[in-house]
Amino acid sequence: MQLTLEFGGGLELLCDSEKIHKVNVDLPNGADDLTMKHLLSWVRTNLIKERPEMFMKGDTVRPGVLVLVNDCDWELSGQLDTTIEDKDVIVFISTLHGG
Amino acid sequence: MEASSEIIRELEELKLKKAEIEHRISSLKAKLQETAAAAERCDAVSNGYSYPMAAAAIEHGLGHGLSPDQIYRYSRQLLLPSFGVEGQASLLKSSVLVIGAGGLGSPALLYLAACGVGRLGIIDHDVVELNNMHRQIIHTEAFIGHPKVKSAAAACRSINSTIKIDEYLEALRTSNALEILSQYDIIVDATDNPPSRYMISDCCVLLGKPLVSGAALGMEGQLTVYNHKGGPCYRCLFPTPPPTTACQRCSDSGVLGVVPGVIGCLQALETVKLASMVGEPLTERMLLFDALSARIRIVKIRGKSSLCTVCGDNSSFNKQQFKDFDYEDFTQFPLSAGPLNLLPTESRISSKEFKEILQKKEPHVLLDVRPCHHYKIVSLPDSLNIPLANLEARLNELSSALKEKEDGHVNTGSCTNPSLYVVCRRGNDSQRAVQYLRESGFDSAKDIIGGLEAWAADVNPNFPTY
Ligand SMILES: [Zn+2]
C-alpha cells in the first residue's frame, strides 16, 4: 500500500536527511491489515540508515518521539495497534527543546 | 594591551550609561505625553467638551475601566469585534510570566508588552552575548555583557511605560519556581533545555496555570498550550525524557534567527488569547513549523493522561516532592556541564604546548574532528578534518597522513615518529576521538585541552570563536 512517511525534529538525519518518503509497504504474510507495529519495523529496516537507537527503543519509538497518523497522535488510535490504510500519512517527529 | 582593555572597559560603561539615559528619555517622553493629554482634557472640560479621566468613565458609564489614553493606545485592538474592549480589559488585568529572554522570549515579550498585558514578569539569569543578537531581537548591542533581564525590561518599558514589569535576575529552580510562578495567571515557557521544560510544566500543574510552550531548533519550531481545560501536561505527552543525545542545543546545532522569532510571536498570540479569553487556544493540538519547506502543520495530540505521574487521576505529586525533585538528574541533562575528563594527563596537551610544537616545527599531524560545516567556519592551518562520526570509516586517511609526515621527515635525517594531535571546538569530542584512536593503535594520539576555544583564549585572541 502507498504511504507517505515524514520525519522531523532531527529524525530526518537518520534517513539520509530526507524528510518525506513516499513508500510502498506490503502487508505482512498472512496478515489482513498493516499495523503501526509492523510499519515501525519496516521503517527501521528500510529507511533508518544510522543510529537506530535514536529512532526506536524496544519495539516502539524512543522517548521524545511523537507519532502522528493522518495528523493525529497515535495515542488516540491505539499506538502500535493502529491500523494503517492506503494513502495514509504518518509523521515521526522528535520533540525540540531549543529556544 | 592594558591601555586597550582600559578603553574597551570604558566604552562598555559608556554604552550602558547611554542605554540607561535613552531609556530614561523615552519613559520621560511617555510621561510628558500623558501629562499633556491630561491637561488637554482638563482644558476641554471648561469648554464643556469632555471630562477628566476618572470622571469621564463615571459620566459615560464605562464599565470596562479603560482610561482615555488606554482607549487611544489600544484602539486598533478595541476595533476588533472578536476582541473588543472586553478583550483588552481582560488583557490589562492579566499577568504573564515569560521564562527565558532568548530567541523565543524576545519577540514574545515585545508583543506582550506592546499589546497591553497588565503585568509582565521576565526571568533569566544569562547575559547578552554578541552571538545572541541574530535571534534575540529584544536586546541591543549596548547591553552586550549585561543581564538579559535588564535589557529586555528596558526594551519593554520603552515600548509601553504604562504596564508593570517585574525583573527576576536569577535562574528558575525548584526552590523559587512555586513562589514566582504563583504570582502570574499565564506562564510562557521560552527556555531551551529539557530539565527546565519538565520543571516548569510540573510547577504549572501544581499551581493550576496554563502553560504556553514553544521550542525551536535549526529550521523547525513547535508550539502548544499545556495544562489548560483538560488538556495534557508536558509529562502526559513525554512521560519519559528523551536520551541526552536527542537533545540538541542551538549553541551546538545552530538555529536560523527568524525561526524562534516565528514561534515566539505565536506564543505571544496564544498568551493574548488565553488572557483575553477569545478564540480557541492551541490545547490538545500542536503546531509544527518547518521553515525550509514553508509548511505549518497543526496536529491533534492526546488529552490529559489519567496515568500521568504528575497531573493524572492517582497522582500524589505535591509541592514538597517538587521542591526535592532533581530535574537535571531525571533528564540526564546537566545545566552547568563541567568539561569532560576522559583521558589521563599524558594523553593531553594544552593549547600553549601545542603552539610550542608548531614553533619548533616538530613533525605531527593535527586532526580536527568537528563536523565539516564547523571546519568551514574557521580552522587551524595544516589540519586534517575528519568528523568524529566518520572517524572509524576514514582511519586510512589518517594513517596515510601520518605516513607522509614520516617519509617527509626521513629525508631530513631524523627518525622520530610524527605525533598525532586532535582538536575540536571545546575539547570534548577530541577526547572521545583520542580514546578511540588509542584503542585502534594510534598510540601517540593526544588531545588539545579546551579545543579551539582554548586556542583563542590562551594563544591567539584574534582566532575567531563561534
Ligand atoms: Zn500530565
Image (tube, coloured by chain):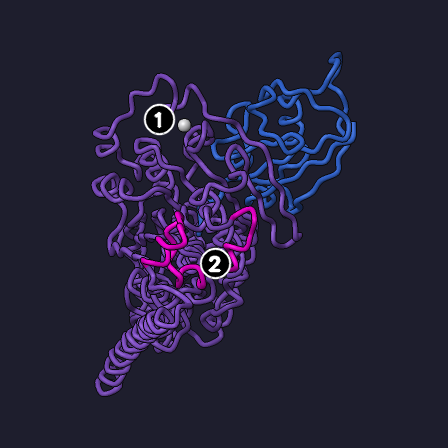
Chain colours: A blue, B purple
Query: What residue would you read off at disc 2?
Result: B370
Q: Nearer the viewer, mark 1 or mark 2?
A: 1
Which element is circle 1 on? loop
Which element is circle 2 on? loop
Q: In the rendered structure, which segment of residues is drawn in magenta?
A: B54-83
Residue at 43% x, 53% y: name it.
B442
The chain letter for the residue carrying disc 2 is: B
**Quarter in which the N terminus of chain B is drawn:** bottom left
In the rendered structure, which disc, 1 or 2, sits on the residue that comes first in sequence?
1
Does B322 lie within the magenta span? no
The residue lying toward the viewer, choosing from A93 and B166, is: B166
- Which percent across, then down, holds residue B156? 36, 63
Please state the quadrant of the image where ligand 1 appears.
top left
Q: Which mark is residue B266?
A: none
The residue lying toward the viewer, choosing from B88 and B24, is: B88
Q: In this view, does B72 lie above or below B119?
A: below
The residue lying toward the viewer, choosing from B158 and A58, is: B158
Does B68 lie within the magenta span? yes
B186 left or right, relative to B318: right
| Residue B190 in view | no
Q: What residue type is labelled 1?
A: Val
Q: Is mark 1 within 8 Å of ligand 1?
A: yes
Q: Residue B310 carries which label?
A: 1
| Residue B458 in view | yes
Cα distance between the residues tagged 1 and 2? 40 Å
The chain letter for the residue carrying disc 1 is: B
Splitting the image into 4 quarters, where does residue B150 fall?
bottom left
B304 left or right, relative to A89: left
